Amino acid sequence: MGTVYEKTATSPVNIAVIKYWGKRDTNLILPTNSSLSVTLSQDHLQSKTTIRASPDFEKTRLWLNGVEDTDIEKNKRLQNCLSETRRLRKEYEERLRKDKNVDNVIPLSEYNLHICSENNFPTAAGLASSASGFACLAYTLSQLYELPISTTELSKIARQGSGSACRSLFGGFVAWEMGSQDDGSDSQAVQIASQDHWPELEALICVVSDAKKDTSSTEGMQNTVNTSTLLQHRIEHVVPLRMKSMIKAIHERDFQKFAEITMQDSNQFHAMCLDTYPPIFYLNDVSRAIIRVITEYNSSNPERKLKAAYTFDAGPNVVIYTTSENVPEIINLIAKYFPGNENTRDYFSDPFQLFVGKAIGEQPLPLGFNDQIISVFPKGNVKQILHTKVGEGPKVVAGEFDGLLNKQGWPKKT
């Protein structure tokens, strides 16, 4: 076997605290407003992609979670990412030949590709799988093609696959600047603060449902654009001020302001979904009950401080942002009112050894907490609690056994 042209990389999930919902251009995926997110650690949530280029491949093929997409020619978002990175690679090859007099430039831009990608979490369940997936695709292509471009420039390509994907190309805290140009040249992601900026900030993800949602984000947000009057008020008057306030809160590590804006923006996002005609329902009874528990937790503590912030994307699963010292209390609250099934190891991931020798859900409630705020739900309504932190952006995986393709260039798993 000759030289193998292949790269494998992983990419993180990002969870927005200022939500993106609505496109002003559906072809270029240009948003109606700017947004801001936190990149989460890849320990629990990541996409992995292996891409190989070869002159021996008859056509470009894609496998997602072990299943081949046999109709990729009609997948416009995928084709946008492939064609744009190939164009840049071709320009790079031509520069090498012309400016540096390199004769043996490998014409990777002309080779077909085998692309194999997988998520280690449910796809289309409201956990930002398309964001991490397209970020991973764009990043892996850039590494395979050795593209001499910045991460912000690469974000404009990832954006054309999935809007939020542009934010998953950075670690830490990331803004997607909506831009104003019709061609999308200034609609891009920029890092607001690094992953190490706020080490006390942590996240709990409560998996309420791993089922595919009834209304996709793509369909839902355009229905909102076409029918919601609340959206117009939000993009003109609310988001610009919230973006400035949130950036300031992050820079100053001001959890009170961070939590307040996060919950307000999540609430308004789902209010827009209800204002859409016909209305969109992403939250369920468990989601709303978690909101009540977190609200009581924030309002009943002696300090009268916000100690946790819930946020929901387009699905019933909740991400709770908090600081390190409050994590055990919140986990105990969730486990008390939303107990898991019998297998505690599957229910709660405890990488930081918070509950060694202790039974989660059976510790005393916080001082002043009204234990009658909701009834205890039947077991299994929260399927899993994931404890994670702010994380890094995409990275190349170089291990011999880390790639998803075998020596012949076909998926190891099918």
Image (tube, rainbow, N blue to C red):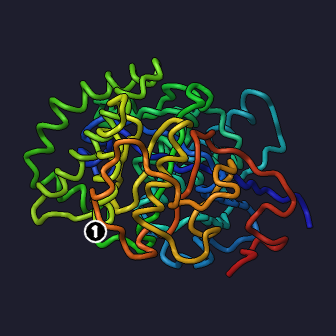
| Quadrant in which the N terminus is drawn | bottom right
Q: Residue 119 placed where, x, y %?
A: 59, 64
Q: Amino acid at mark 1?
A: Thr
**Callout 1: 10 Å neighbours few (<14), some, many (20+)?**
some
Q: Residue furthest right?
A: 1
Q: As drawn, is 71 to the left or to the right of 220?
A: right
Residue drawn 61% across and 75% down?
343
Residue under label 1, please give it: 215
Decide: is 113 above or below 327.
below
| Quadrant in which the C terminus is drawn | bottom right
Is residue 81 among the parts visible in the rendering? no
Is residue 45 among the parts visible in the rendering? yes
Q: Residue 165 placed where, x, y %?
A: 47, 48
Residue drawn 73% across and 61% down?
52
Q: As drawn, is 37 to the left or to the right of 398?
A: left
Instruction: Residue 407: name its quadrant.
Output: bottom right
Decide: is 201 above or below 57.
above
Q: Residue 91 placed where, x, y %?
A: 62, 39
Q: Nearer the viewer, residue 141 or 16?
A: 16
Instruction: Residue 283: name its quadrant.
Output: bottom left
Task: Please tell me how many numbered marks the rendered image carries.
Answer: 1
Q: Residue 321 placed where, x, y %?
A: 45, 42
Residue drawn 64% across and 44% down?
394
Q: Nearer the viewer, residue 102 or 399?
A: 399
Q: Secondary structure at mark 1?
A: loop
Residue drawn 67% across and 67% down?
114
Q: As drawn, is 62 to the left or to the right of 157?
A: right
Decide: is 129 above or below 91.
below
Q: Nearer the viewer, residue 147 or 19?
A: 19
